[in-house]
Image (cartoon, rainbow, N blue to C red):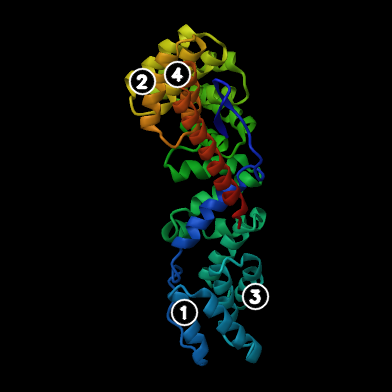
Amino acid sequence: MLQLLPDCTLTARRIDLPPPGVMIFARLLCLLLLSVPIGFAQNPPVSFPDPRMARADELLRAGKSQDALALLNEVATAAPGTPHLEAKLGKACFRSNQFRQAVPHLKLALQQNDADPESAQLLALSYFALAEYAQAIPLLEKLNAQLSENIPDGPYLLASSYVMTQRWDDARKTFAGVFSVPPDSATAYLMFGKFLVRQRLEDRAVPEIQTALQRDPQLAMAHFILGEIDLYKGDAPAAVEELTKELAINPSVWLVYWRLGDAYVRLEKYDEAEKVLKEAVWLNETSSGPYILLGQVALKRNDPAAAAGFLERAAELDPQNDYVHYFLGKAYQSLGRPAEANQHFAIARQLRNNKRTDERASFQQGP
């Protein structure tokens, strides 16, 4: 995770996280579960002899999965052989986020009726939620066409499962299909590399992006991503080399100038940093990143008045950024304005505490 640190540089830092990709997949799944319609498998209407089954179906359609589950458990106790009971129990557990409990019901439902696509889809999603990707893959492969029609994220889930089981070629080809690009093209390798970076699999991303450049040496944004990885690893000279190559290919993207400025700041080459950071601002005046770095450069040059100007602009653009307030506090402190400095230091501490609280809450949410 790339973060600003209060040491007058932009740097990369890892924070304690679950294994690579797990939280991202979990968050995706949480969004997915909220969007999965009850009848997405287009099964024909079923007549239930037990009125409780019909009532449970109504409750599921109404989103009252816990009530439906309680009612279905009553049926299971009284008449465990009731037709379609296992499928409904599996669906109710799934909709209640009880994925571990859903699996045996859905497996039994498929044993009773292997032509039940809804149970198959829910079983695949349950395995995915449980991070049991090897079990999810055969179902996702079999259901891929139906998932594409009913759940737009279906192919993404399959490709993600390939990544989590280190089936790299299958993952790249699936992602290429999602974005309608040839699976062995330079673009396919680049897009897959970008995805791997998102999953914090930087070392695995590098050969994918290098292969993309071998296939198309003028491919835009490939050197940029390699430069980003170098920055993440703290290798500023390598980042300068990659980002300079990107500018030769792609001189109109402000992000490249910003990150090149970041690398120069780390190397304490402040003249070079100021030049490219101002170019980043000229291309995009609405991002706080270049202004923060320009403020840091001014502080390094012992010019707190200029630093305050840059950082005040950054605060207008990004008032919830704790690092903006931290550096602005340092500028005011150097200007002999202690009250304003302390005010911004306090804001920075509060925002940092809020961020940590939000991160803890987010990490505790899992499948």
| Mark toward the start of the polypeptide (3 vs 1) | 1
Identify the residue under disc 4: 295
Circle 2 or circle 4, nearest the eye: 4
Q: Which mark is residue 59?
A: 1
The residue depicted at 60 percent of the width and 36 percent of the height is: 200
Q: Amino acid at mark 3?
A: Leu
Task: Rate crowding at label 4 as few (under 14), some (14 to 19) or many (20 or more) other CA atoms within 10 Å.
Answer: many
The location of residue 264, given as percent across then percent down, is 52, 13
Question: Can residue 184 be seen in this snapshot?
Answer: no
The residue depicted at 45 percent of the width and 45 percent of the height is: 178
The location of residue 317, given as percent across then percent down, is 37, 31
User: CA–CA distance between discs 3 and 4?
Assistant: 63 Å
| Mark toward the start of the polypeptide (2 vs 4) | 2
Secondary structure at numbered mark 4: helix
Q: Amino acid at mark 2?
A: Val
Identify the residue under disc 3: 108
Circle 1 or circle 4, nearest the eye: 4
Q: Is residue 128 shown left or right of residue 177?
A: right
Q: Which mark is residue 362?
A: none
Which of 131/304 is in front?
A: 304
Which of 251/193 is in front?
A: 251
